[in-house]
Amino acid sequence: MSDEMMNRGHANQGHSNQGHSGHETEYEREDLGTRGVFSFMIGLAIVGIVIYFIIVGMYRFLDKYERSQMTSASPLVPLKGEMSRVVTQPEVDKEFKDNGAPMLEINERGQFRDFLINQESQLNSYGWVDEKGGVAHIPIERAMELTVQRGFPVYPQSGADASATAPAKKPAAAKQQTSGP
């Protein structure tokens, strides 16, 4: 590049001004037009809509194909109605309640809250576990107080008596094994 091109737009550094006042700043005269940006956005929206309809059409085709290839469990039993991916709660109740299958959760938070409330009430109340057998449950705080007062139950260990006499018998058993044929 020539010196003139290098000094363009800069202040005079000892050279003659050559028609420039030195106070002008250079800038790019062509920016990205709004027409191009909007054209791109409209094209992108059109492509998105086309892709959406392609996917919907593909799923419809695959559903029809699956239904046409499906065989019933028995050729004597016809299929019931049209196959649907949407299952409602009354349909689930009708199909699964009578056969003893576990039910899916309908209201997970509500059912979990009810479960926790039932557990908390059982931990903090008196009641029967087995009334005929005489087994009851008591509040957990009361159970801890009784444990502190009475201590833990201690059961005699049947292995302790056998281990005290076992060393005396082992040498005799060892003698019998060594004195054999």
Image (spheres, rainbow, N blue to C red):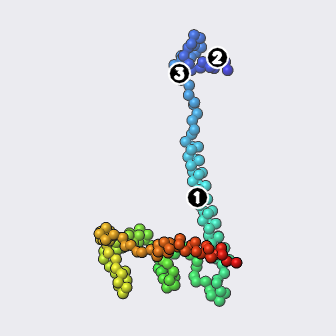
Secondary structure category for the residue under label 3: loop
* Residue at the spot 34% in from the left edge and 72% down from the top edge: 123
Give the percent coordinates (x, y) of residue 60: 62, 70
Secondary structure category for the residue under label 2: helix
Q: Is residue 128 left or right of residue 71?
A: left
Q: Please rate how many residues cluster around mark 1, counting C-alpha atoms within 10 Å: few if below 14, some from 14 to 19, many from 20.
A: few
* Front in this rendered view, residue 18 or 89: 89
Precedes in sequence: disc 1 or disc 3: 3
* Residue at the spot 59% in from the left edge and 61% down from the top edge: 52
**Three-letter residue code for mark 1:** Ile
Evaluate if marks 3 and 2 touch, with contact meaning CB atoms under 8 Å apart: no
Identify residue for label 3. 24
The tally of labels here is 3
Identify residue for label 1. 49
Mark-to-mark CA distance, 1 and 3? 49 Å
Identify residue for label 2. 3
Secondary structure category for the residue under label 1: helix
Picture quadrant where residue 154 is located: bottom left
Residue 114 in view, yes or no: no
User: Is the residue 22 above or below the residue 135 in the image?
Assistant: above
* Front in this rendered view, residue 89 or 123: 123
- The extreme bottom residue here reads 76
Residue 78 in view, yes or no: yes
Precedes in sequence: disc 2 or disc 1: 2
**Three-letter residue code for mark 3:** Glu
Precedes in sequence: disc 3 or disc 2: 2
**Three-letter residue code for mark 2:** Asp
